[in-house]
Image (cartoon, rainbow, N blue to C red):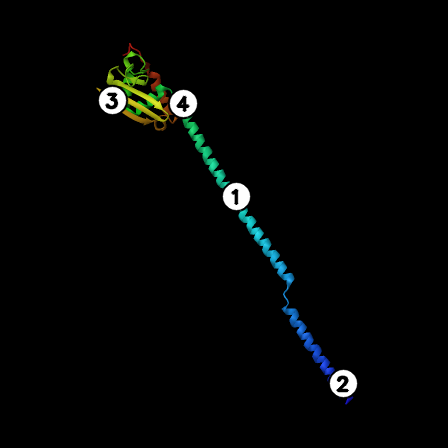
């Protein structure tokens, strides 16, 4: 009897120990892994910071690139504008008048130039004192009213005036366009300057 009771007690102790072991395993497995969560949170934070840094760098680089392109374009436009302005200010009134007439009346201009009767002057004597063209530059062939081409320059605009009888013919031309068309290459410059050298100085005697 004692042996049977002892066996029953041992069996009860073993069963109780097994149940407790099982319960302990379940509790342990259901407990959250705080270390794993911390690692995950740290990694997520690092990834977010990395992405933010890359995004910020990209935005800064794009902005810097745009600013550089804008500055380069502005500098290029400024250089071109300065170059054109230098060309214009280096041209004499005779050169500008020649360019205008090569556009407006080239055959007439070359014909009288070859004949030696093409003159350049400024309308400043008593003949023009009460005229709207007083003070203007002019080029004329034989001295009669219809052969005078008066011109003034204001920036890129040339105002060209000719009198056909009593009628005033006024026209505006682009100096930059005339330069591109007649005074761009070295051979063109030589041709224009050759015409200019043949212009005679106007005087009352020539009139």
Counting residues from the start of the chain, the first of labels 3 and 2 encountered is 2
Counting residues from the start of the chain, the first of labels 3 and 1 encountered is 1
Counting residues from the start of the chain, the first of labels 2 and 4 encountered is 2
Q: Which residue is mark 3?
A: 168
Q: Which residue is mark 1?
A: 61
Residue 6 tag number: 2
Q: Residue 66: x percent and y percent?
A: 48, 41
Q: Mark 3: few, some, or many residues within 10 Å (few <14, many ≥20)?
A: few
- Indicate left or right for 188 with 36 as reference: left
Counting residues from the start of the chain, the first of labels 2 and 1 encountered is 2
In space, the residues marked 2 and 1 are separated at their CA atoms by 85 Å
Disc 3 vs disc 2: Cβ atoms closer than 8 Å? no
Q: Mark 1: few, some, or many residues within 10 Å (few <14, many ≥20)?
A: few
Q: In which quadrant of the rendered view does residue 108 lie? A: top left
Q: Which residue is mark 4?
A: 89
Q: What element does badge 1 sit on?
A: helix
Seen as rendered, the residue at the extreme left is 165
Q: What element does badge 4 sit on?
A: helix
In space, the residues marked 3 and 2 are separated at their CA atoms by 143 Å
- Indicate left or right for 134 with 44 as reference: left
Label 2 vs label 4, nearer the camera: 2
Q: Is residue 14 above or below residue 45?
A: below
Q: Is residue 66 above or below residue 98?
A: below
- Please state which of residues 83 and 4 is positioned toward the viewer in this rendering: 4
Q: What element does badge 2 sit on?
A: helix
Disc 3 vs disc 1: Cβ atoms closer than 8 Å? no
């Amino acid at each position: 009897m004692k042996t049977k009771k002892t066996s029953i007690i041992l069996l009860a102790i073993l069963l109780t120990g097994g149940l407790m072991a099982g319960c302990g395993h379940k509790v342990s497995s259901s407990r959250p892994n705080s270390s794993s969560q911390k690692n995950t949170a740290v990694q997520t934070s690092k990834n977010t910071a990395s992405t933010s840094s890359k995004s910020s760098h990209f935005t800064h680089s794009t902005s810097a690139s745009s600013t550089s392109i804008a500055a380069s374009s502005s500098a290029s436009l400024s250089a071109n504008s300065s170059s054109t302005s230098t060309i214009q200010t280096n041209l004499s009134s005779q050169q500008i008048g020649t360019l205008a007439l090569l556009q407006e009346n080239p055959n007439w201009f070359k014909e009288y130039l070859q004949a030696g009767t093409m003159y350049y002057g400024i309308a400043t004597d008593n003949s023009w004192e009460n005229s709207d063209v007083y003070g203007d530059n002019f080029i004329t062939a034989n001295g009669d009213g219809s052969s005078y081409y008066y011109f003034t320059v204001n920036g890129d605009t040339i105002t060209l005036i000719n009198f056909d009888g009593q009628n005033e013919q006024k026209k505006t031309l682009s100096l930059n366009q005339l330069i591109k068309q007649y005074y761009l290459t070295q051979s063109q410059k030589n041709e224009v300057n050759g015409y200019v050298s043949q212009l005679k100085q106007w005087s009352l005697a020539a009139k």
